[in-house]
Amino acid sequence: MQESPGIRLLRWIVLFAALIIMLFPIYWMVNTALKPSTQVFESPPTFFSTAWSLDAFFALFESRPIGRYFLNSLVVAGGTTVLSVVLASFAAYGLTRFPVRIEPLIILALLFIKMLPEALLVVPFYQLIADVRMLNSYLSLVLVYSSFALPFAIWMLIGFFRVIPRDLDEAGIMDGASRLQTFWLVVLPLARPGLVAVAMFTFLTAWNAYLWSLVLTTDPSMYVLPVGIATLKGEYQVHWNELMAAAVIAIVPVLAIYTVLERYLVAGITAGAVKG
Amino acid sequence: MVMKKRAAIGLVAALTVSLSSSVGALAQEITLQWQATALSEAQYEPIWKDMVAAFEAEHPDVRIEPIMVPRADNWTKFVTSAQAGAAPCIVSVPIPSAAYNGYLMSVQDMWDSEPESYKSVWAQNAFGALTFEGELYGLPHYAGIYGEVYNRSLLEAAGLDPEALPTTWEEYLEWAKALTGEDHWATTVLAGPTDTTTRVLLSWIYSNGGRAFNEDLTEATFAKDPKSLEAIKFYLSLASEHGVAAPGPATLNYNEQTILFAQEKIATMRNAYWGLAKVLGDNPDLADDLLVAAPPANSEDAMSVATLTTVSISANCEYPEQAWEFIKFMNEPEWAVRMVSAANWMPLRTDLLDRPEVAGDPIVQTYLEIGANSLTIPLPTPAWEQIASKDVVEAVQRALQEPDRVEEIFTDLDALVTQRLNDI
Amino acid sequence: MTSDQDTTSDQAGTVPAWTSRGASRSSRPWRGAGLKRERWLGYYFLLPAILLTTALIATPLARAFWTSLHRTRGLRSDFVGLDNYVYLLTTAEFWESLRVSAVFTTVCVFFHMLLGLGLALMLNKVVFARTLLRVGLLAPWIVAPSLGAIIWVWLLEPQFGVVNYMLSSIGLIERYQTWLGTPELALASVMIVDIWRGTPFVMLLLLAGLQGIPRDQYEAATIDGASAWQQFRFITLPNLRYLLVVASTLDVIYTMRHFDVIAVMTAGGPIGATEVLPVLIYNTAFTQNNFGRASAIGILLLGVILIFAIFYLRATQPGKARED
């Protein structure tokens, strides 16, 4: 399909205009994070500054154990990703390879979980975790996040597994492999782009979650990044540059992951995941 | 299939082992959790760290575990854990609401068994806010007293005499007009969604000798008391009719107000002593420019507002004796005095008034004089949080939208708040 | 519903499932093909996921429902049956919040879909700087909602915020606005932030759908002399239709239950102008300390969302859906 250069140019202009609008808040975050305290409230505000420095980052690291928060986030988001992808793969395999009579019920349940308003469950969730004495543990956060991430993960993987030919499974079984071996050696490798896409979604969900970790951790050394960052908003002080510096630290890793793995994301969804 | 089951069990086991954190590893030692928003304040941090270290040195079997909490989420976090019977032992939360809900432990017996010499050092007028249904539920931690803060340079630039600060509403309005210009204003009218809005409104009502509640807290009188209504109308007219207040009151909270003051966008603000620390944190150049006076008044029996931050023990606390020790310890003169100078928090112990850090600081003295003539909030009703952070705020926001209907709006507020006071 | 698809001949990743739907839905070879001894195997594969979600979601949900039947006062509570529901359904507070939720969701989803589709269509044709554009446009969705909201609070700050500065210097506004300070502006502001945050996700789903449309359909159309509009109308839209339904329904559900942005930016104010249902739940539970009533609102919200879920299931379930 040939296009005139005019249309192409127009498309580029529109796309880059959209890009600038979408990225402007993020640019402003970085800009503020790099400003020394004295320039934060300058009027008119500066868009670039020769006085840019990393002072806010140093101040931040001095006032809060940001490294520890970062580690907590990493463990929790990583653990959630691993657990969710494993369980979701099993479930999606079960649903697409075997006759499961309660399948419509399961799909409905998955959708149902996605809809639950968080605020409704805060207190009962806390009671449950407190009852089993698992407050302040990575495990409780991983389990809670997983239970919320699982529906979407299963849902995407179902569509993905469905397009992997079942002939392959059957060929594997003919060769004497067990179901589990077939699953592990034949199906999973083929599903890789989908698994990566699902992992990216799950990681992001867990990395960004706020309310659950706020209530399920009482020990500050167990705070994840979003909660740790929220403690920067004190009653008597808000240092915008430090707050923005903290936001930069929270955002850069996921942005990097998405940049590196971007092609899996679109390809993974394209390959069948969105069909539910 | 069997293999799969084993794999699943193995997986769960592995996760459990690898992900469980090392909670509960320490035996024999008593750990007391301490949750307070104050812990996140930069200027308080060195003080409480020293204080905790000193306490632990004195009590080797007790460990204090501070819980820093996002300011906006303090109550959420407390309630959630209290609901599960797992609240931190030592907490700073609004006493009436928390005690009403059964989240706090009465400390009446422990207080009663203290010697008279200890009990007598406390400013007695503070204890109303600590008592619920006749029982004491905590000790004061620090106070905030509301005065009027001025920027000396801006006054001089407007041709006003900083040595003769306004004492009446008329003078204040005159000054306010002189202090307002193209992109700067005299002051702020606060209507942001926090209880600071209510604190400042009450300080105006009290400065007219008005009352927003009746004596036994069964009725709201924002509009019913003519002096209260007059004060509300005058205060709001600063924003509407006279245009001497910064725009967008509904977005202005304590933080925005102090930033505007630090940036010299406004010349006066109604604030407590800690507001000065905040301003100087934002703009150290103002160090020599800050003046404080009693709020301008319009009545013989004008008063101001003092707020009280308290420390209590949770109902589920397993070690109330040790918690009580710690609460007393944090109010020892050594720490209280440091809090005055570093965090600008007012002490509530009368035995501190002669200490040089307190007696030698003219601004502290001014605040203490205002405080001697102040009414304390929060008021002892479990509905206080909702009244102060929601009902009054919404009424102020509405009244600013519809300046002609102020009386009607606050009459509605009276009805609503009266219902809340009795509906418990 | 999922195993109704039969795409045995396709290699993974080449043809998306939804483009082939309808092709062979009558045959259900799989149901019968499972070996007898494997009949229960599917459930074993499902078991871990079911156990986890049941343990972690069903119990708290049941507890929340139980709470909604009580009048609570802190640790004490009295059973009051449906009183909380009756109260909610007969007072203005709930209905007003539902109205705000409906306006918020309608406007946001409309723009998510419109802008998401537009961006996806343009991105689909781009080769140069593809990763930059894709990740750049996805970035608002990657940023945690709680952080994104904090950034916007700072952008919209009345005195020192850059939005006021920029809009007034290009003459769009005469004086600095307090974006979160008046009811109308506050609602518009949180909607703009949600559109900023939610558009990329729709864009991503639709882009994935566009990538799955076989090239040869367009090539054939070009040979037949179809215009760009005709190609969009007769190839792109039909192929994308299923995904448009999926994306819009999912988006309604997500937007309806969204909490973080409004909680951080306005907490529901001023004067309740932005108090959508999830924020009302939170405020009722933690400002009013009324857990019984808060739980009841939550259950009612769940009911509202369930209506969309049923619509979604009907629209996507091949057996019941009308032919494309």
Image (tube, coloured by chain):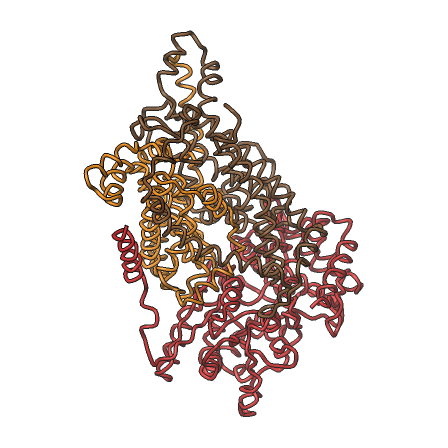
Question: In the image, is A188 to the left or to the right of A224?
Answer: left
Closest to the observer, B237 or B229: B229
- Taking the spot 55% from the left edge, 58% from the top edge, the residue there is C64
Which is nearer the eye, A184 or B299?
Answer: A184
Q: Quadrant of residue A263?
A: top left
Quarter holding residue B410: bottom right
Quadrant, the C terminus of chain B: bottom right
Q: Is residue A206 left or right of residue C98?
A: left
Position in image of residue B150 (x %, y %):
59, 61
Image coordinates of residue B96 in percent, x first then y, are 62, 72
- Residue at image position (37%, 49%) is A250
Residue A203 visible in the current orientation? no
Colour orange belongs to chain: A
Residue A180 higher or lower than B5, as above or below:
above
Q: What is the display colour for chain C?
A: brown
Query: In the picture shown, does residue B109 fall above or below B400?
Result: below
Residue B63, position as x, y percentages in the image = 37, 77
- Please report the residue visible at 31 percent of the width from the left and 42 percent of the height from the top: A257
Furthest-left residue in this view? A175
Asked whether A76 or C189 is in front, the reply is A76
Q: Against B71, is C304 above or below?
A: above
Chain painted red: B
- Position of residue C169 measured from the top left corner of the image (x, y, whole percent): 53, 34
Q: Is residue C67 above or below residue A245?
A: below
